[in-house]
Amino acid sequence: MLQTVAVLDYGSQYTGLIVRRLRELRVHSRLYSGIVSAEELSREKPAALVLSGGPNSVYDKKSPQCDPGIFQLGLPVLGICYGAQLLAYHLGGKVAPSGIKEYGRAGVRKTHDSLILAGLPDKFDVWMSHGDLVVEPPPGASIILETDACPAAAFQLEEKRFYAVQFHPEVHHTPNGGELLENFLYNVVGLKGDWLMKSFAESSITSLREKIGKNGKVVMGISGGVDSTVAAALISQAIGDNLIGIFVDNGLLRKGEFERVMARYGKRFNIRGIRMGERFLAALRGVTNPEEKRKIIGRVFVDVFQEAANQVEDALFLGQGTLYPDVIESSGGYGSGGAAVIKSHHNVGGLPEKMGFKLVEPLRELFKDEVRELGVAIGIPEDELRRHPFPGPGLAVRIIGEVTPERVTTLQEVDSIVLEEIHAAGWYRKLWQAFAVLLPNASVGVMGDQRTYEAVAALRMVESADGMTADWAELPHDILRRISNRITNEVKGVNRVVYDISSKPPATIEWE
Ligand code: XMP
């Protein structure tokens, strides 16, 4: 069993970061709603609790409160910002609005020795972001840090192993924050630091076996992308051929992708390939609206997947490559105000609940880069783990206007030249994505002595850390020239190539 720290979420924008920092310190951590009951927590047997920050005031009737019972579990607790105020408030201290809202960098001074301050200087900078503050720590507590504006910037109840900090040790702007967290985990809680990808893989395989059982069958949509690849590999290492991967060719894949995935994955696990291109393209006939295209593709995918899954006898479980950020986004936890829908993303994971399967989501706790690390740990080749993201609706959102079989073929040819040249030039790994878009209008050209009137392809090459923001890549001109020449020479029906020099925002990465 991995030792786990439970992080209770009160809506801070930094809660995910706390989880992340603890893992970087080799400790497994798991996120819980801030209102989780003490009873549920004690069943889960965490080694310690961390209470996150949050935008509320502890006295506000509508603010998320912790179950006071969590302080009776005998577990070490670290309260951060709002979490520190909760700790003070529930243990008999006083919290009040601070005269001045403290926001940004502040200098703290040590006022008392503490295990969580071991090795830290007497004065250091921290990141503050709060309206209320603890004006009176709970009875028996000692103040360990102060600032000019915040007399109890940190306090402790040493015997109970309760610690509270008004600032945010999890953000980079608190340079000593990592050490403080490390002190809490190792000096106070006495953890071993057993979170390594290899041990995570082993413990996931064991718990997948327990959950699915000896004869349980899992069906899973495979996309060829990193997440579903790693999730499927892990499940198959747990249950072997009782995992049935379903790979749907929607007719909108990259050139040769179906054959490639079937050949490569077929060696690794049980996979069924289903060619349904005609059905998708028939449903898309005459449709030009981007959102409508996405919805149609999503709908047909669900139907096709359901039909394929029905053919698997006794399948009880549905495998999905859901990641931690997806879980946080969709949990609607405190503070996650419904973000506006920019595009209705469709993924192979986007299957409705009504299908009646039990979910198996072995990557639920991981961030994207951790998925890659896990992939390496379970033996997936590096080049597969470095593949660029490819949207669920595939080339349909890169064909502006109507999606016809001819236009799909044209874009597949253009796209494969782009990828070939980007690989050959050694740029693939430097880019987040590199692809082509087929525009709806024709442009005039000249070929030999003939006037031509043919399609335009736009190249989109971006650098990005997470797809949320992106910059167009400053690709050397000779590579662009080679790509352009090859496209206009080799692909029938395209006489012009343009380069997209828009960043995200305001543009998005995909054109639709
Ligand atoms: P945008 O175009 O919103 O894309 O800047 C951000 C990232 O998401 C990918 N993307 C999708 N992925 N289903 C997916 O699985 C979709 O419908 C979809 N739309 C965009 C896009 O390729 C980029 O990496």
Image (tube, rainbow, N blue to C red):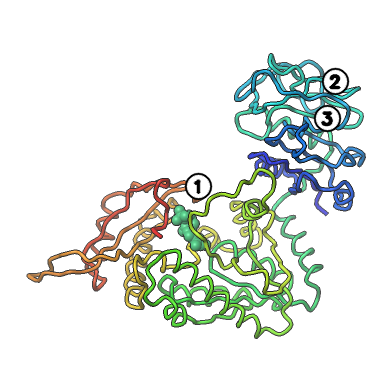
Q: How many neighbours does mark 3 have within 10 angstroms: few (below 14), some (14-19), or many (20 or more)? A: some
The type of residue carrying mark 2 is Ser
Asked which secondary structure carries label 2, the reply is strand
Helix, strand or loop at mark 1: loop
The residue most toward the top is 148
Question: Looking at this view, is 33 or 268 the one in front?
Answer: 33
Residue 215 is marked as none
Residue 389 shows up from this direction = no
Instruction: Say which label, 3 or 2, has the lower sequence index.
Output: 3
Rendering quarter of residue 150: top right
Which residue, given by chain and number where applicable, does mark 2 sit on? 142
Q: Nearer the viewer, residue 116 or 148?
A: 148
Distance from disc 3 to disc 2, alpha carbons, whole Å, reads 15 Å
120 and 169: which is toward the camera: 169
Task: State left or right for residue 233 relative to residue 449.
Answer: right
Label 1 and label 3: CA atoms lie apart by 40 Å
Q: Which residue is depicted at the point 86% across and 32% down?
A: 90
Residue denoted by label 3: 89
The dot on residue 465 is 1
Residue 15 in the image: x percent, y percent?
A: 68, 41
Is the residue indicated by label 1 positioned so its CB lies within 8 Å of ligand 1? no
Q: Do labels 2 and 1 touch, CB within 8 Å?
A: no
**For this view, does 19 lie left or right of residue 249?**
right
Indicate which label's residue lies in the foreground, 3 or 2: 3
Residue 422 position within the rendered picture, expressed as x and y whole percent measured from the top left:
37, 58
Q: Residues within 10 Å of mark 2 (few under 14, many from 20)?
A: some
Type of the residue with mark 3:
Tyr
Please tell me whether mark 3 sits on a helix, a strand or a loop: helix
Tell me, yes or no, whether the two marked residues, 3 and 2, touch with CB atoms within 8 Å. no
Residue 176: where, in percent of width, then height? 67, 27
